[in-house]
Amino acid sequence: MSFVISRRRVGVFGGTFDPPHVAHVVLAAAAIEQLNLDSLVVTPAGVPWQKVGSREISSGAARLEMARAAFADVARVEVSDIEVRREGNSYTIDTLEALDGDDIDLFLLLGSDAAAGLDTWSRYEDLAKISTIAVFPRRGHETAKPPAGFSWELLELPGLEVSSTDIRRRVRSGRPIVGLVPAAVRQIVELQGLYVDSEGVDESAP
């Protein structure tokens, strides 16, 4: 007698999430629906090595707390501290290998700009072997796609032009962020005084 192993479809949504905003939440919900995911694991980066030195980055604990608040009402989303707990730089392949299994199909959510540069990532050949790239369009990079060798699917999203960079700038200049981030995230930003002391840093980094 043979048995059919039921496979689970698991998405991975990484990022700095400094702060997470409404477009992140919309993307998560859309990915779950369009990819028919059993779960979506949101992984705030512990040490986002590509951004270190470009600007001040909020603590991993603060970004993890904001992410949990932001995605609290989205069904099938789990916010994981796997990268915050890991020592050293955060590499996506390490996270994917930790989440992989014989009964799991992995989908990595990436903006089209990041997806186009996947062949510069750490151990990108291994990343291509164990995951399908779920690409969401980013303004100015709508036609960008992963390099050859990657399996990928294109997500359809509403045109929400919201960025963490703009939110940090608004906080620093005293402008409101109501509607741009979930209310629970805005409360954390205000209570912890995040982004108000970022004078002199390069805020061109997302």
Image (cartoon, rainbow, N blue to C red):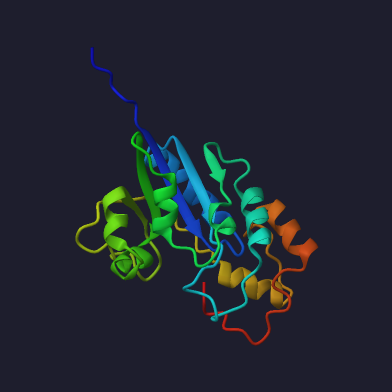
The residue at the point 52 percent across, 50 percent down is 42
The residue at the point 68 percent across, 84 percent down is 199
Q: Would you identify the image quadrant in which residue 136 lies? A: bottom left
State whether residue 50 appears in this view.
yes
> Which residue in the rendered view is the most extreme toward the front?
87
The residue at the point 31 percent across, 49 percent down is 130
> Which residue in the rendered view is the most extreme toward the top?
1
**Residue 195 falls left or right of residue 202:** right
The residue at the point 57 percent across, 41 percent down is 74
Q: Is residue 92 above or below residue 103?
A: below
**Residue 54 falls left or right of residue 176:** left
Q: Would you identify the image quadrant in which residue 66 lies? A: bottom right
Residue 112 percent location from the top left of the image? 35, 63
Residue 78 percent location from the top left of the image? 55, 43
Residue 18 percent location from the top left of the image? 60, 65
Q: The N terminus is located in which quarter? A: top left
Residue 76 percent location from the top left of the image? 52, 37
> Which residue in the rendered view is the most extreme toward the left?
148
